[in-house]
Amino acid sequence: MFDTHAPSQGPVVLTRATTHPTSGADLLVATHKRDGGRAWRMTASYDYGRNAYEQHRELALALLTKHFELSPGRCWQLVAMGHDQNHYFHTAETANADVVAAIEAVQ
């Protein structure tokens, strides 16, 4: 049974790797769909000198931060991630920005 009161039921962002159709450049694409199929997308160049997981994570957060403004003192935090053969799926929720910054400073 699906628990409608479970934590971490925020927006999901799908990220994937692809190739630009004309230049052949390797890209990452993040997509979030909602509200009757409306989609928000963001694209970034793939950097082979960096960890792929971190690049997907950063792009998912960047898409949410750019397109979905939060109240002062709040920020997006990724709380779960899954993947299949072609995509990463990131679940986000809002959090206290000061707490998130303190946790990231320790890591």
Image (cartoon, helix red, strand yellow):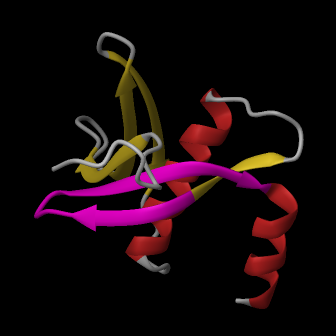
Residue closer to the observer: 43 or 5? 5
Q: Is 21 on the left-hand or right-hand side of 42?
A: left
Q: With respect to residue 70, does 83 lie above or below?
A: below
The residue shown at (55%, 40%) is: 63
Say which quarter of the image contains residue 26: bottom left
The residue shown at (47%, 55%) is: 7
Looking at the rendered image, the quarter that the C terminus falls into is bottom right
| Magenta region includes residue 4 | no
The residues colored magenta run 78-96
Give the x, y percent position of residue 67.
61, 28
Q: Is 13 on the left-hand or right-hand side of 83?
A: right
Give the x, y percent position of residue 93.
56, 49
Residue closer to the observer: 87 or 106? 106
Q: With respect to residue 22, does 90 lie above or below?
A: below
Residue closer to the observer: 7 or 107? 7
Instruction: Tell me which secondary structure the magenta stretch mostly adopts.
Output: strand
Give the x, y percent position of residue 95.
70, 54
